[in-house]
Amino acid sequence: MDNRKSLVLRGAAECVKEDELDRLLSSKENPKAYIGFEPSGLLHAGSLVPMLKCRELVEAGFKVTILLADWHGYINDKLGGSWDNLKAGVDYQRQMFSIFCPGVNFQTASDLVEKKGYWEMVLRVSKVSSLKRMRRALSIMGRDEGDGDKDMSKFFYPAMQATDIYALDVDLALGGMDQRHAHMLARDAADKLKLTKPVALHTPLLGSLSGPGRMDTDAKMSKSDPNGTLLVHDSKKALTKKLSKAYCPLEREGNPVLDLWQHLLEPAIGEIIIERPEKFGGNLEFNSYLELEESYLSGSLHPLDLKNGTASALFNLVEPLQEACLENSEYYDVLVSAMN
């Protein structure tokens, strides 16, 4: 069990609760896990961090379901609220995630909401949750607490996300740290409704290349900040240009370039090579992320070398996703058109 547990927890920001995870791993050979993704446009590097954890959960024996959350995207006004665009977004995510994380299963929210008892459970969750709690949970949508006052459907979203967990009968709910409110709501409601509580596993959030903002949400890599986001479809030239302008202080806290190596590149690729031209001494290889961090913070590794090497490594990681879209660009093309 120790090997499975270390695989589940590797790189995670939080597990609620670890003793519950211990019991789960000791009692089930193939537990069920899930993560939900709204169809909201093209993927960025931050999207790959929880997907990397899905890979590790599959390796640890979990049956992992990715909920392609079209109804949630509709409520959250994604892709203009167009169902044609939302469907393309779902198909695009299925295409991308199948390549990056083979072995996962897929379920759409459109299919899930038709499951007997789904809407009854949404009401039951709402019944045992306060409006204050629901309002606070709107942050899971990237919304502030006042957004629900303009559109009451927003308040259904947290109750639906809790119900998704019960309807899929999962043992573990996965998400970024920005999904914590939803998972705590699901655990609390499960206690009150006499349901089994899911273990909640949260991955770190990649920082915006623009650097820390005034709010926690400002610091997160997001498509709403084009200059601070690395799209998985960016060319190597585009990645290099964006990273050349990235906030990259000689300190660890709030450094988005080091975030990329710690939370995505090193665990996904399994090695750390900073590519450099031969005239500048050739490639640099590091044995661990901590060795890379120490070299940079000590001044031994130049910021431009770090940034250029990061661009090369990220391009190598996402190139299979780009090639898949070149072979079949149907869904990608719809999304690009919808976003312009």
Image: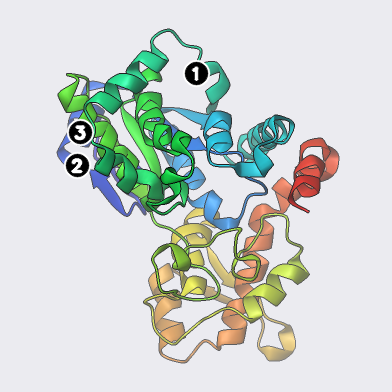
Measured from the top left, where is residue 38 in percent x and y? 55, 39
Q: Amino acid at mark 3?
A: Asp
Q: Earlier in the sequence, mark 3 or mark 1?
A: 1
* Secondary structure found at label 3: helix
**Spatial separation of the CA atoms under disc 3 and disc 2:** 17 Å
Q: Nearer the viewer, residue 231 or 194?
A: 194
Residue behind mark 1: 112
Q: Earlier in the sequence, mark 3 or mark 2?
A: 2
Lateral position of residue 141 relative to residue 16, left or right: right
Measured from the top left, where is residue 62 in percent x and y? 39, 28
Measured from the top left, where is residue 21 in percent x and y? 23, 35
Residue behind mark 3: 188
Toward the front, the furthest residue is: 150
Residue behind mark 2: 18
> Residue at 82% across / 36% down in the picture?
330
Lateral position of residue 94 relative to residue 22, left or right: right
Q: Earlier in the sequence, mark 2 or mark 1?
A: 2
Number of numbered discs: 3
What is the quadrant of residue 242 in the picture?
Answer: bottom right
Dot 1: within a 10 Å radius of its alpha carbon, few (fewer than 14), some, or many (20 or more) residues? some
Q: Nearer the viewer, residue 262 or 223?
A: 223
